[in-house]
Image (cartoon, coloured by chain):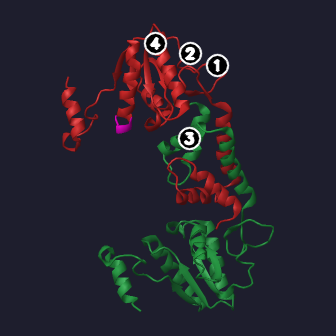
Chain colours: A red, B green
Amino acid sequence: MYSPSIQKLIEEFSKLPGVGPRAAARFAFSLIGKKRSETDGLAQAIINVKKNVKCCRLCFNVYESDLEICGICSDARRDNGLLCVVANETDLATIDKTGAYKGRYFVLGSPLSSLRRHPADTARLSELEKRARQNKALKEIILAINPTPDGQAAILYLERMLKPSGVKITRLGLGLPFGGELEYADEETLQSALRGRQ
Amino acid sequence: MYSPSIQKLIEEFSKLPGVGPRAAARFAFSLIGKKRSETDGLAQAIINVKKNVKCCRLCFNVYESDLEICGICSDARRDNGLLCVVANETDLATIDKTGAYKGRYFVLGSPLSSLRRHPADTARLSELEKRARQNKALKEIILAINPTPDGQAAILYLERMLKPSGVKITRLGLGLPFGGELEYADEETLQSALRGRQ
């Protein structure tokens, strides 16, 4: 089909999430059309990210610094009584950007649909369970997980797993999104908004 | 927001066609979650493609070999009387895969909407115009360009540009796609199918 180097690049691009062969070919040819200095930028950024980015052994978020743990975990002003459990690093960044939360985090780091299936996930889950049991400072665990079907299943599973620890378990409030319109809200959202009326 | 290496990688991914900041972040974190050996594969493929792939000075298609010109242009069995003008390398590959065409190619190599606007495109257009005038072996130029609004405009422009050369100019047949249903065909397609009845 295409020459070997192009074929290989298309294959590599196809491994990215949500990228099919046609998008991968479009990416490949866009690079071929660019200057060497520009494409080296992407290649170097990939190499650098693997070289510099570490996984925090406390919250499992990504970070880069010479410290042993990440910036959030080493920040003494943060509340040790609150632990926010998120599915992945982007969700953590989204929540932290709001500035509304000043506690600690815990990244589950795998697709919600496969939480219990893979051994690597089980390791993080047991770690979370252990912390809920052993960390006496902990007052509340917030399950900040997408209210999707997979997320709901994960929330139920986590609630059941964490209940014996005696720590208070909460989840994010459901209701109308700010700026949303009643007319376009689905039934589930509207029911949640009614139940959660303030 | 994210740490510098991650931010940089997201920026680089955002430069790919059709990739917004959210998709770019998804790509970045998928690489962070992979083994070094796997991500090096992508970085190396990007570097290799720029090192190995050349642009044929005859048809402007991409190729990789030690030859001076590409495999199609150096193939003596191909018909020198036919020249197929395509928008880009993927269209060329798509046409050549059918095996229905055994002539030569000419890659315009830029978005159809901007054919006349950028100087680099003008260079290829003048080259095409010169070949149509000077290549006495040439009997037909096929404008194998998408029948989209931008493509139609490009076809009209090329027809006008190439007409003085006296070479026969054709475009791809329009009609129902194989396996298509009358009921779902748009009006333009149906009109073309009626005009082109065999």
Q: Sequence order check: which comes first, mark 2 or mark 1?
A: 1
Dot 1: within a 10 Å radius of its alpha carbon, few (fewer than 14), some, or many (20 or more) residues? few
Q: Nearer the viewer, mark 3 or mark 2?
A: 3
Which chain does the residue under circle 4 lie in? A
Q: Is residue A28 above or below residue B168?
A: above
Q: Which residues are magenta?
A: A146-150
Where residue A145 appears, x then y in whole percent?
39, 30
The residue pinned by badge 1 equals: A67
Task: Check if mark 2 and mark 4 are on a common chain.
Answer: yes
The residue pinned by badge 2 equals: A74
Q: Is residue A47 above or below residue B126?
A: above
What's the amino acid at mark 1? Leu
Q: Are marks 4 and 1 in contact (CB under 8 Å)?
A: no
Q: Nearer the viewer, mark 4 or mark 1?
A: 4
Query: Label 3, label 2: how many angstroms apart (C-alpha)?
Result: 26 Å
Where residue B90 appears, x then y in whole percent?
58, 67
Task: Check if mark 2 and mark 1 are on a common chain.
Answer: yes
Q: Residue at x 75, y 56 (%)?
A: B51
Query: Label 2, label 1: how many angstroms apart (C-alpha)?
Result: 9 Å
Is A180 included in the stretch rendered in magenta?
no
Task: Check if mark 4 and mark 1 are on a common chain.
Answer: yes
The residue pinned by badge 4 equals: A133
Give whichever of B109, B193 is nearer the camera: B193
Identify the secondary structure beneath mark 2.
Answer: loop
What's the amino acid at mark 2? Ser
Give whichever of A118, B30 is nearer the camera: A118
Q: Are marks 3 and 4 in contact (CB under 8 Å)?
A: no
The residue pinned by badge 3 equals: B30
Query: Label 3, label 1: how many angstroms apart (C-alpha)?
Result: 24 Å
